[in-house]
Image: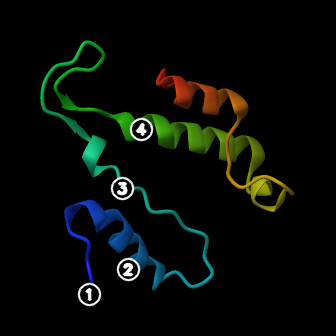
Amino acid sequence: MNSAGRYGGAITAAMFLKEFVDETPWIHLDIAGTAWVDENKAWIAKGPSGIAVRTLVEFAQDFARTGASWATSAGVSSPGTDAAQKRADSGAGL
């Protein structure tokens, strides 16, 4: 397999998984790089970050509200709300 090394691992993993899903909708979340904080920061403690939890909670809440209807709506390429996007852009989380 041709791999781009450590920093190409997410793409390599996604392409590998793609071979097994046929037409089933799926996502690959490469969260390892943000899963652990090596030192205390003003905004987050050292240790497990929980950063992906915020993303998954927001996705689940949006999906519960709208189901898969976002996937077939004209002009909408991904799930989410304007408020969620603004929070993500600001770095504020939930």
Q: What SS does tag 1 mark? A: loop
Three-letter amino acid code at the position of disc 3: Asp
Q: CA distance from mark 4 to mark 1?
A: 31 Å
Q: Residues within 10 Å of mark 1 (few under 14, many from 20)?
A: few
Q: Nearer the viewer, mark 4 or mark 1?
A: 1
x and y percentages locating residue 61 in the rendered image: 63, 38
Q: Give me the disc on residue 53.
A: 4
Q: Which residue is mark 2?
A: 16
Q: Quickly name the residue at label 1.
A: 1
Distance, label 2 to label 4, CA atoms, is 24 Å
Residue at figure coordinates x 80%, y 55% from the top left? 69
Residue 72's place in the image compared with 81, above or below, is below
Residue with the mark numbered 3: 30
Colouring convention used in this rendered image of the protein: rainbow
Q: CA distance from mark 3 to mark 2?
A: 13 Å
Query: Foreground mark, 2 or 4?
Result: 2
Mark 3 touching mark 2, by CB under 8 A?
no
Residue 20: % across, % down: 46, 84
Total labels: the figure holds 4
Whether pointer 2 and pointer 4 mark residues with C-beta atoms closer than 8 Å, the reply is no
What amino acid is labelled 1 in the image? Met
- Who's the residue at 20% across and 63% down the image? 6
66 versus 47 height, above or below: below
Q: Residue 12: x, y in percent?
A: 34, 73
Disc number placed over residue 25 in the picture, else none: none
* Of marks 4 and 3, the one in the foreground: 3
Q: Is residue 29 left or right of residue 4?
A: right
Badge 2 amino acid:
Phe
Evaluate if marks 1 and 2 touch, with contact meaning CB atoms under 8 Å apart.
yes
Question: How crowded is the residue under tag 2: few (<14 C-alpha within 10 Å), some, or many (20+)?
Answer: few
Name the mark nearer the viewer: 1 or 3.
Answer: 1
